[in-house]
């Protein structure tokens, strides 16, 4: 019998605690700093995660688990230092010349 991942388990992982149902791994970082927690809260509110250049993997790891727990598609907007961006929609990657184009695409599919 598989255990259902709940939002409380994700929240515990974000604070660096054990999830309580063995969904985290010591080799996969999940703990979020305060600024990352703010980004995570905005991702929950808007339905997609925005990653900046040089972002730690923790935020993406936790967002993936949250999407599984909520049974929602994985949607990530990844910005690059050169101004370009990608949108990761489940297993597909869409490339854009600017972050504004990527953001417009994400807003279109989430509205």
Image (cartoon, rainbow, N blue to C red):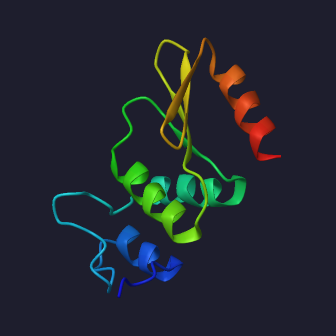
Q: How many marks?
A: 0
- Left or right: 44 with respect to 64? right
Q: Nearer the viewer, residue 37 or 109?
A: 109
Q: Is residue 51 above or below residue 45?
A: above
Q: Nearer the viewer, residue 110 or 59?
A: 110
Q: Is residue 6 above or below residue 59?
A: below
Q: Which residue is drawn at the image coordinates 51% and 70% (left, top)? A: 69
Q: Which residue is drawn at the image coordinates 62% and 48% (left, top)? A: 48
- Left or right: 30 with respect to 100? left
Residue 101 location, x and y as percent?
71, 20
Q: Quadrant of residue 50?
A: top right
Q: Nearer the viewer, residue 16 or 3?
A: 3
Q: Which residue is drawn at the image coordinates 23% and 57% (left, top)? A: 28
Which residue sits furthest right?
111
Residue 5 location, x and y as percent?
45, 78
Residue 73 location, x and y as percent?
59, 53
Q: Quadrant of residue 55?
A: top left
Which residue sits furthest left?
27
Q: Which residue is drawn at the image coordinates 71% and 53% (left, top)? A: 46
Residue 102 location, x and y as percent?
66, 26
Q: Nearer the viewer, residue 66 or 43?
A: 66
Q: Quadrant of residue 89?
A: top right
Quadrant of the snapshot with the N terminus: bottom left
């Amino acid at each position: 019998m598989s255990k259902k991942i709940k939002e409380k388990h994700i929240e515990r992982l974000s604070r660096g605690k054990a999830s309580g149902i063995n969904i985290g791994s010591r080799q996969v970082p999940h703990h979020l700093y305060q600024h990352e927690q703010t980004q995570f809260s905005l991702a929950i509110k808007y339905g997609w995660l925005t990653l900046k250049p040089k972002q730690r993997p923790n935020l993406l790891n936790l967002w993936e688990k949250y999407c599984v727990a909520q049974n929602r598609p994985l949607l990530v907007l990844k910005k690059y230092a050169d101004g370009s961006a990608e949108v990761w929609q489940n297993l597909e990657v869409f490339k854009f010349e600017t972050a504004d184009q990527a953001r417009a695409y994400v807003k279109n599919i989430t509205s």
